[in-house]
Image (cartoon, helix red, strand yellow):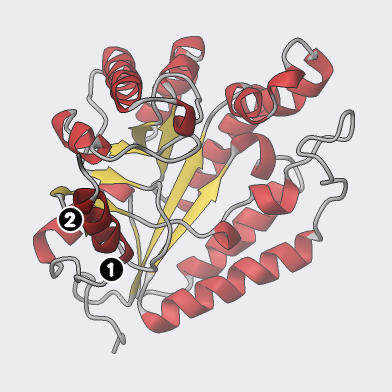
Amino acid sequence: MAESSVWPTGYRCAVVLTVDYNDIHGILTQAPEVAGRDKTLSVWRYGTQRGVDRLLGLFEELGVPSSWCIPGIVAEENPEHMRAIQAAGHEIACAGYRHENYDSLSLAEQTTALARGCQVLADITGQRPQGFRIPAGNWAPGFVEALREQGIRWSSSWRGDDLPFAHPTTAQVIELPLHYELEDEPYFAFNLSPAVPPAQSRIASYSHTLGNLQMDFAGFHRFGLCYVLRLHPEIIATPGRIGVLRELLKGIQQHDDVWIATAADVAQWWTESAAPTAEDHPAAVYERHYREYLP
């Protein structure tokens, strides 16, 4: 019997596989100085060149669904990958239009980027996205209402919890929280010439990384939580690292009480079945603070 009874009957915990497909646009936001350095940028172009296909192949092999978070500009530049992701039955979510740091954008600019990104994805796939992930930074107060207006049902941008929660001002938008330890980037993202990000000059042990991810899953499974894995095709889908992911997912699949679902499916379940967000939840505290300081 699960310690948490929040999931569909028979399931102890949920697992959501998310993929951030940013091509070179993610690193250009993080390190604008690499613009024009094709050798450096080739590290991030690897996702488009090899990583997307390799991830799709693994997901097909294991029969698992996933949710892909994609900026509109990446979709425009790589429509064949968009079609392949969609044809394989995976979810496509919005990450704005350009990969931008939202700390540098006004609410109006954030809203415009969201609307443009959603429209590009709809034009290419024929379906409006139901999910959103902020590319970088923080959204401005009032942005969650813009998500709702664009038809977004879930976000996976915040942290601070192990279970989904409804945003207090817009209960129709469900947040699927992230954890840094459930991401590939802190372990493997690096480039030596020049060092990007700075001071990250070594590769984490593959076996230790796998062990960490497995131990985290064991904890999420034990407590009946929502294990949101955040992947990048240029990072996890190299010939060696794809094996780390394969072993992790095969181990998860050995548990018949784990619900491996898209973010949209988890958000729909949470909308229909979960209790309201508690007053002491970080999202509710933020909302009260924001309202108190409105002019």
* 102 or 175, nearer to the observer: 102
Answer left or right for 290 relative to 168. right
Residue drawn at (36%, 25%) of the image: 106
Task: Work out whether 94 lies above or below 221.
Answer: above
Q: Amino acid at mark 1?
A: His
Q: Quadrant of residue 249?
A: bottom right
Q: Quadrant of residue 289?
A: bottom left
Answer left or right for 249 relative to 208. left
Q: Earlier in the sequence, mark 1 or mark 2?
A: 2
Q: Amino acid at mark 2?
A: Pro
The quarter of the picture where the C terminus appears is top left
Q: Can you identify the residue that label 2 sits on?
A: 168
Q: Position of residue 187 (x, y in %)?
A: 72, 54
**Residue at far left of view:** 272
Q: Can you identify the residue that label 1 sits on?
A: 281
Question: Alpha-carbon neighbours of circle 1 within 10 Å: few (<14), some, or many (≥20)?
Answer: some
Tags 1 and 2 in contact by the CB under 8 Å rule?
yes
Residue drawn at (51%, 11%) of the image: 77
